[in-house]
Amino acid sequence: MPEPSSTDIQEAELIQHVFYGNLDNLPNLASKIVRIFTSSTFTDTSMERNSLMQHTYPKLKEYCREKHGLEFQVVDMRWGVRDEATDDHKTTELCMQEIDNCQRVSVGPNFVVFLGQKYGYRPLPTKIEEAEFRLILSVSSPEDARLLTQWYKLDSNNIPSLFCLQPVSSIFTNFTNKAHPRLMEEDQSQWWETMSKLNRAVRCAALALFNQGKFTAQDNHRYNWSVTEQEVVRGILNAKDRVDHTLAFFRHIENINISLLRHSMKFIDIASKLIDEEAQRMLSDLRDVRVPAALPKSSIIRYTVEWSDEDGLNKNVHAEYLQNFIDTFYQRILELIDQGVGQQKSLAAN
């Protein structure tokens, strides 16, 4: 009787693991989907994302179907996040789940980031461990402490216990009340003002704890980072085989006219009518240091364009750039799809 091969032994061990209820390290089923998460800030990339939606994604959808029999999907969380997700503060969590889904099911590319000069929205932490929350309260002003304890409630059923940010509508009851638009608008306005105060409170406390040596730099950073950075960490920096599955597009606008606040604030972080230097430092660290350290130069596509006082970026003024961008995006995604299909066929053959 011939000796069992190493493959036979591995298959037998895998079957035994399954019988014992261990479902870790199971081989992936061959996927029939290309699913890409696109990460970006919102106001500064609408021209590019709209062009991709109009011109590029339909072509990629057709290519995937006709050439490989695959379904092409794009996840762009900057469009259409439902009000309930905002009310429950689930937006960031949903983004992370979608990134995981794309990494799990996609053939080839699964994550693309567009970074310009805007660091973007920095959300409140939705869950804070009890011990950490009490540290935050210990260095907060009485006013900030009252606000924090109003909005964060203890969940002692969790291990460890957590203080959880309450739904907006639990206090501002008309936050999602579309039947009464005026009341909804008033409550939404009050929430944005309250959220700003909460953000300031937790960031000031985190910095104070860092200065006291009770928080690490990473602890402090968790109270300051943007949704986009969290997406990039999940989608690129902490991802397996990122070179085969991710791309980064960086765009720099020369000579942004900060005085035209109505336009400039769409493209760069502004605080009190000035450039938000803290946000810019965090963006620079992400865009200019950490992503280039994680990806080869060939996976990062860079553009430089000139500011237009008309509206910052304009599809007519910047037509050449825009065409180059969507053409390059199409070609690079195509390459990753073909490569992914080839790898999948090779694995199946083995």
Image (cartoon, grey):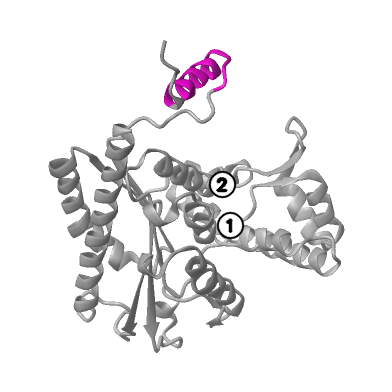
Q: Earlier in the sequence, mark 2 or mark 1?
A: 2
Q: Is residue 12 magenta?
A: yes
**Residue 36 at x, y = what percent?**
34, 49
Pick the residue in front: 277 or 177.
Answer: 277
Residue 89 is marked as 2
Q: Magenta: predominant secondary structure element?
A: helix
Instruction: State whether residue 176 appears in this view.
Output: no
Whole-number angstrom distance, CA of label 2 to CA of label 1: 9 Å
Q: Are marks 2 and 1 in contact (CB under 8 Å)?
A: yes
**Residue 265 at x, y = what percent?**
45, 76
Residue 123 is marked as 1
Q: Mark 1: which amino acid? A: Pro
Instruction: State whether residue 113 appears in this view.
Output: yes
Seen in the picture, residue 292 relative to 88 is either above or below; the reply is: below
Q: Mark 2: which amino acid? A: His
What's the magenta region?
7-22
Quadrant containing the C terminus in the rendered view: top left
* SS assignment at label 1: loop
State the image quarter where residue 46 is shown. bottom left
Residue at the location (74% across, 53% down)? 148
Q: Is residue 8 magenta?
A: yes
